[in-house]
Image (tube, coloured by chain):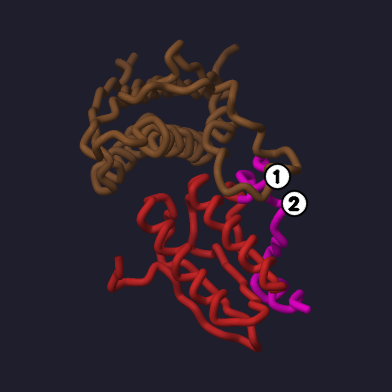
Chain colours: A brown, B red
Amino acid sequence: MSEPRVEVVRISNDPAAIAALRDRVVRVLDEEGFSDASAFAVRLAFEEAISNAFRHGHKGLPADEPVEVRLRVERDRAEIVVEDRGPGFDPRAIPDPTLEANLDKPSGRGLMLIRAYMTTVEHNERGNRVRMVFQSRTSGN
Amino acid sequence: MASGESILMVRREEGVARIEFTKKDILDESNIQQIGEEISKIIDQSEQPKVLISFSNVRHLSSAALGTLITINNKVKNKGGQLRLSDIDPQIYEVFVITRLNQLFQIHEHADEALSSFA
């Protein structure tokens, strides 16, 4: 029985730092034997959550204000928590980007993609922290 | 900000600007912004632009990249032009389906098919 891989990282809005953490997440998923499709899903959700945290959560905050990322990976399950230092938002207030009237709007798809690819997606009350879990379908129910 | 290295390869074939990416990941904000600026310049150069964007080298893209593609599509349409997408990896195509953007864009399996679809 292997122990879960747990990492807690604080990163600022620096493309090189974000890319390094992305590569780290991908490596951990690979080492834990995630399939290509599962790794694609987790990586996409990670990318969108980090992007949301800096683009929206930290709007108006200094670029060096860090976002905290907690990663826990074990065999068929990956959990990522992304917490920003912004005021938070109401996830229920995001318009559905798949409605005809919103299809040609260039933003508002990140959270929808996270929800589509991850098994569980939860926000805290304030709306500055998202917890995302990917559970491989091959595991027991 | 000017960058010495383009993320795009652009060639012209029978009046069509055929664009490919040199990177397999289209994720970084700065890259996405640069792509938007470079393609906007191509659109600006033509009265009725015909643009084909091939994703043959691309393995990952973010919703911010989708946003840039939508902006490009809107610009092309505003000029009475035509935009086609092609060679999209199945995993990425799934992202287009989930977001229903496969209904907004004209997507072809291969670039040759896309090229012959221009009016």
Residue B7: % across, % down: 40, 67
User: Which of the pair A33/B118 is nearer the observer?
Assistant: B118
In the rendered image, the vertical position of residue B52 relative to residue B29, given as above or below:
below
Q: Secondary structure at mark 2?
A: loop
Residue A81 is a magenta residue: no
Quarter of the image where one finds residue A99: top right
User: Which of the pair B75/B67 is nearer the observer?
Assistant: B75
Q: Secondary structure at mark 1?
A: loop
The residue at the point 64 percent across, 81 percent down is B47
Contact (Cβ within 8 Å) of mark 1 with mark 2:
yes
Chain ID, mark 1: B
Drawn side of residue A76 relative to residue B29, left or right:
right
Disc number for residue B103: 2
Q: Quadrant of the N terminus of chain A?
A: top left
Residue A51: % across, % down: 41, 39
Can the viewer see residue A73? no
Residue, disc 1: B100
**Label 2 environment density (alpha carbons within 10 Å; few <14, some 14–19, many ≥20):** few
Q: Are marks 1 and 2 on the same chain?
A: yes
In the rendered image, the vertical position of residue B112 relative to residue A61, given as above or below:
below
**Label 1 environment density (alpha carbons within 10 Å; few <14, some 14–19, many ≥20):** some
The residue at the point 47 percent across, 39 percent down is A44
Residue B101: % across, % down: 68, 49
Residue B113 is a magenta residue: yes
In the rendered image, the vertical position of residue A73 relative to residue B63, given as above or below:
above
The residue at the point 72 percent across, 73 percent down is B80
Residue B20: % across, % down: 51, 70
**Where does the magenta region start and end?**
B93-119
Disc number for residue A69: none
| Amino acid type shown at disc 2 | Gln
| Amino acid type shown at disc 1 | Arg
